Image: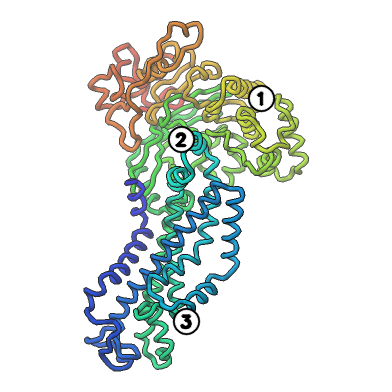
Amino acid sequence: MGATVRMLFASRRFTLSLALLLAVVALGLLGPLVSSRDPLLMSGGMFEAPSREHWLGTDNFGRDVFTQLLYGTRTSLYVGAIAGLVATAIGVAVGALAGYRGGWLDEMLMGLTNVFITIPSIVILILVSVSLRTRTATIMGLVIGLTSWPWTARAVRAQTTSLKTREHMDVARLSGLSTPRIILFEILPFMFSYIFMAFILQFFGGLMSEATLSMLGLGPFQTVSLGVMLQWALLWEAVRVGAWWAFLPPVFFLTVTSFSLMSLNASMDEFFNPRARDRSARAGARAVARLREVAPHAEAGDEPAPDALLACWQLHAAYVSPGLPPVWAVNGVSLAVRPGEVLGIAGESGCGKTTLAHLLACHLEPPLYLLKGQIRVAGRDPLTLSPERLRREVRGELVAMLPQGALNALNPTRRVGALAVDVVREHHPELTRREVLDQARRRFEHLGLPAAVLDQYPHQLSGGMKQRVVAVLSTLLNPRVLIADEPTSALDVTSQRAVLDLLRRLLEEGIIQSVVFITHELPLLQQVAHRIAVMYAGRLVETGRVEEVLAGPQHPYTQALVRSVLAPEPRRGRARVEGIPGAPPDLRELPQGCAFAPRCGVALDRCRVEVPPRFRSGDRDAWCWRLLEEGWLPAPVAGRRGLPPGDG
């Protein structure tokens, strides 16, 4: 919660809008302390100009306009706040109940909502206000709130309908929670940001409705509001006689209050909408420029392997959000993937594997920024291409990504065949829909998947079939490299084997030439990978051939990973599984020295103060100071030509 507040206040628009609104509220609340006059007391002549005695002059009855402005602001804000609270509460209650329960209750509540929407709210407000014998500020706020909730109800109902299908809702229902508790504790917390923004909009609507009714002579009795001040100015023709002080101050305060509310709502929308926030965060761009200055410099003179399809060296990347410390997700990572090779990347959750996958796939969008380093895809530098060329010439054509959570990557409203058409025709618009479907059908049949899948919706497919479908869709353009980010997570053993068999066949058939396989399940890498790279806290800690690394891990973290999983046959009967003590460090505050030192049982004093360099023995690299005692030598500063350097 604290981080969210800091990020909000880092937005200049939010802070300025909030400061402006608080200034108006403060004037309204402190009105009696600023001016001791009665706002309805006649203390001067008709339409007297501003003077020392009357700072903003007098109105048509000789009453002090400045005093009226203070009291009127408080009344208008009070009416708007009451209307906003009532309308938001009713809208949230009706929308959440209709969306969660569904059925006849949903139809009845939404039918009532639609009736209110079809009748202009101003007509209802006028009819109700005329019928009231007394119109206090509280009654005005309640009336406005009771007639302006339908739009909030419809929006909340749509949000609730989506939320109730999520997995945590099944757990809540199976636990026997009642409907009110589920709505209060399992649904509404996910909509807090939207509910707050809805309140701001309803507050604004209540403010404007009160002003409109007051100008029509239907405002609160025996009190002053900004709308009532405008009504008096209109009745006594203040504009015609040139008494600008009678109408401009309430117009100005209404404008300032409305502007601050709408600007506050827009700034919160930018914050809670990641795409809008990230594209507008100029402060984030300045922070990135500063981080690029302090990021470690890449090794000079190093080139990727000549035969590498995908290579990177000295990548430093961070998530940068205004008002928060940067999250250093990738620190000095260097890798190369050659034709016909499966490179496995392993590590615990939160170690930077998925971030590295996005970098290798050239998928860089704020708040993720590449601060230092280089990438080569099939000999090309994708970072020099325009976004349009990167999308058309690299993504899908040279490198494709099988994303984490691919089970939910398919659009539930479209058939699989339509998704295949979108993928191919985006790069080859000259092909017709029928030609693309024929190609996709042949590809599915060639890889042992039923072609009938193309005519089905995602919800008609099993989890394992969805995963394989996403894999095939990702490779329809025959990319050189496929980056598979945990493609077997949440699958049973049979489905895992089917996905692995599909990846092998894609390689054997030449549809793809290399695979980067990211997982935290080491036994899977033993089945599919040729080489392995182990990551911890955004850094590489060990690389080498998979059988050598898993049979004789050198880095303490790799050793701990191997001990934490059940070994395959024939060692299964005598293997002892041990958990890794502690947890990975916070990437915003990496410890000094080796990041694994706080969890390492064999750490040296040097490990806690100095980041270990890369040590090499044959084709194996590891980053651990203890290897110096075992005869390993630090790798050359510039690395061997043809291999990208490690983390120096």
- The disc at residue 355 is 2
> Residue 415, percent across and down?
69, 40
Image colouring: rainbow
Query: Which is more N-terminal, label 2 or label 3?
Result: 3
For the question of whether residue 516 can be seen, the reply is no
**10 Å neighbourhood of mark 3: few (<14), some, or many (≥20)?**
some
Residue behind mark 1: 510
Tell which residue pokes out farthest to the front in this image. 133
Instruction: Tell me the kind of residue under disc 2.
Output: Thr
Secondary structure beneath dot 1 equals loop
- Left or right: residue 154 versus residue 322 is right
Q: Quadrant of residue 440?
A: top right
Q: State the residue in front, 170 or 462.
A: 170
Q: Which mark is residue 216?
A: 3
The residue that appears at 38% across and 80% down in the rendered structure is 221
Whole-number angstrom distance, CA of label 3 to CA of label 2: 59 Å
Residue 542 falls left or right of residue 592 = right
Give left or right: position of 257 versus 122. left
Badge 3 amino acid: Leu
Residue toward you, 46 or 116:
116
Which numbered tag is attached to residue 126? none
Q: Position of residue 391 (x, y in %)?
A: 58, 43
Quarter of the image for residue 142 reads: bottom left
